[in-house]
Image: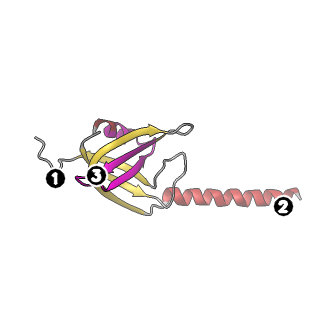
Amino acid sequence: MKKTLFIILGCLLALYLCYFAFVYYVPYSEGTRAGELIKFSNRGVMIKTWEGEISQGISGAQIFSFSVLDKNEDVIEKMKEYQGSYVKVTYVERYTTFAFWGDTKYFITDVVKENSPHFNRN
């Protein structure tokens, strides 16, 4: 009886680890997006995650929501610095997310400040 229980628990643990590895190592897509960085915050009550939004258009009708993993400290610092600026971000889209990673499936891996195509800011 105990041996069967350990085998079942071992199989369930192995399945969970395979699922976690798949979500972590296999991206759904990779790409870049550009827009005005309108929001970036460290949110959550028990689990704090970095979340942000980029407005992709003059009216702000198209919003791109994203997360940044805690291990990307340089990206977090750049996001804080570029708040309100036009930026181009490189992201990885995953099949799903976990609560300790963030609220979205889009994870920013790099950010670069760009000149806005809408306004001439000299």
**Three-letter code for the amino acid on which mark 2 is drawn:** Thr
**Three-letter code for the amino acid on which mark 1 is drawn:** Pro
Point 31% across, 44% down: residue:
38
**Three-letter code for the amino acid on which mark 3 is drawn:** Gly
Point 26% across, 40% down: residue:
84
Q: Is residue 23 magenta?
A: no
Return the mark for residue 17: none
Point 72% across, 61% down: residue:
11
Q: CA distance from mark 1 to mark 2?
A: 64 Å
Q: CA distance from mark 2 to mark 3?
A: 57 Å
Pick the residue in front: 34 or 78.
Answer: 34
Quarter holding the N terminus is bottom right
Mark 3 crowd level (few <14, some 14–19, many ≥20, 10 Å Cα): few
Q: Locate residue 29, reporting x and y percent.
A: 40, 63
Q: Is residue 71 magenta?
A: yes
Is residue 33 placed above or below 74 in the rendered structure?
below
Pick the residue in front: 79 or 23.
Answer: 79
Mark 1 crowd level (few <14, some 14–19, many ≥20, 10 Å Cα): few
Q: Locate residue 55, reporting x and y percent.
A: 29, 51
Return the mark for residue 60: 3
Q: Locate residue 83, reporting x and y percent.
A: 29, 39
Mark 2 crowd level (few <14, some 14–19, many ≥20, 10 Å Cα): few
**Magenta-highlighted residues:** 50-79
Residue under numbered circle 1: 117
- The disc, 3 or 1, on the residue closer to the chain's N-terminal end is 3
Q: Quadrant of residue 5?
A: bottom right
Q: Is residue 63 left or right of residue 85?
A: right
Q: Is residue 4 left or right of residue 102?
A: right
Residue under numbered circle 2: 4
- The disc, 2 or 3, on the residue closer to the chain's N-terminal end is 2
